[in-house]
Image (spheres, rainbow, N blue to C red):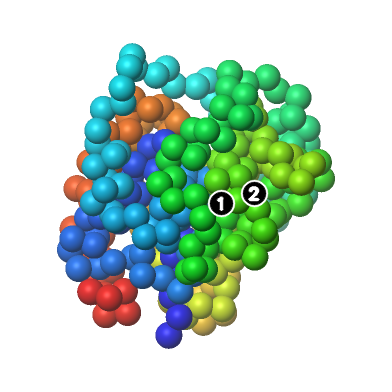
Amino acid sequence: MTYALVLGAGGVTGIAWETGLLKGLRDAGVDLTAADLVVGTSAGSVVGAQVTTGVPLDDLYRRQVEPSPGPPERPPDLGKLTEFLAAGSGLDRAAGVPARPSREMLAWIGRQARACSTKVSEAGRLAVIKARLPVHEWPERPLVVTAVDTADGTFVTWWRSSGIPLPLAVASSCAVPWVHPPTTIHGRRYMDGGVRSTTNADLAAGHDLVVIVAPTATLRRTSMEEEAAELRRAGARVEVVVPDAGAVEAIGPNPLDPGRRIEAAKAGLAQAPAAAEALAGVRERLGG
């Protein structure tokens, strides 16, 4: 039986919550990281790259709960992004409306992303991503990182065989439109894979077991649900883990708020025992 782990988008707090959850699950005897394929989108691409390159979960969690040096960072303004997500949330509940944005819509967002001025430069953003990745080489284990071409809205997947540096792939997946600059790769500019879907779980097709970890389940929820339904129709067993009430409160309204990072990581760790119980049916396959 083959197993795929899908790590969804969720900003800085999503990275923290996923890290705390994965560590807590491992401590409870359910190691989600022992997957045949890891699909990483935005925050999930950071965590996916970290765990597949062999960085110990204990080290990753310790980094998440350590206070940042220097003065507190101000959370970025999510005004335009929030408007887009709110509109999409309404649309994807409407009958007959596709849960994922069309390629034309993604291209429009891409034009917005290229035209928007951001507080950090592309080089500065890449430096931030490199600092988050203790290992900068692609893992031997299968890892796929998602992004979207800002020029035409094409959905892109990066693999080890793509021939681009891992930090660049992750930076492109984390290039939140209206917040961070698109990432240039071979002369083209790419943005956050979470704009297409916060999970992109359809990339796990063909695996017998799929576990989806979704920090921002309330955003584009229908997209995640449709992806899970498609996988189930194809014969896969699909398990979904989303933040519980305590984690939702810890994460707060702005997933990119660095001030919420420590509490989000602790909330993921606190949620893990209940999540491990919910995953008891697949514990043996997950190595517990």
| Number of the front mark, 2 or 1 | 1
Circle 2 residues within 10 Å: few <14, some 14–19, many ≥20: many
Is residue 278 depicted above or below 40 in this figure?
below
Disc 2 to disc 1: CB gap under 8 Å? no
Q: Position of residue 258 (x, y in %)?
A: 38, 27
In this rendering, the answer to whether 276 lies above or below 117 is below
Residue 255 drawn at (x, y percent)? 43, 34
Q: In terms of secondary structure, where does tag 2 sit?
A: strand
> Would residue 75 appear left or right of 234 to someone viewing this image?
left
Residue furthest toward the bottom? Answer: 1
Residue 147: mark in rendering: 2
Q: Examine the image and state in which quarter residue 254 appears.
A: top left
Left or right for 196, reference 7: right
155 sits to left or right of 47: right
Give the class, few, some or many, for how many residues have Cα within 10 Å of label 1's Cα (few <14, many ≥20).
many
Residue type at mark 2 is: Ala
- Taking the spot 34% from the left edge, 42% from the top edge, the residue there is 16
In this rendered view, identify the residue nearer to me: 18 or 239: 18
Between discs 2 and 1, the one toward the N terminus:
2
Residue in the image at 33% along x and 33% along y: 261
Q: Which residue appears at 24% of the width and 60% of the height?
A: 25
- Checking the image for residue 166, the label placed there is 1
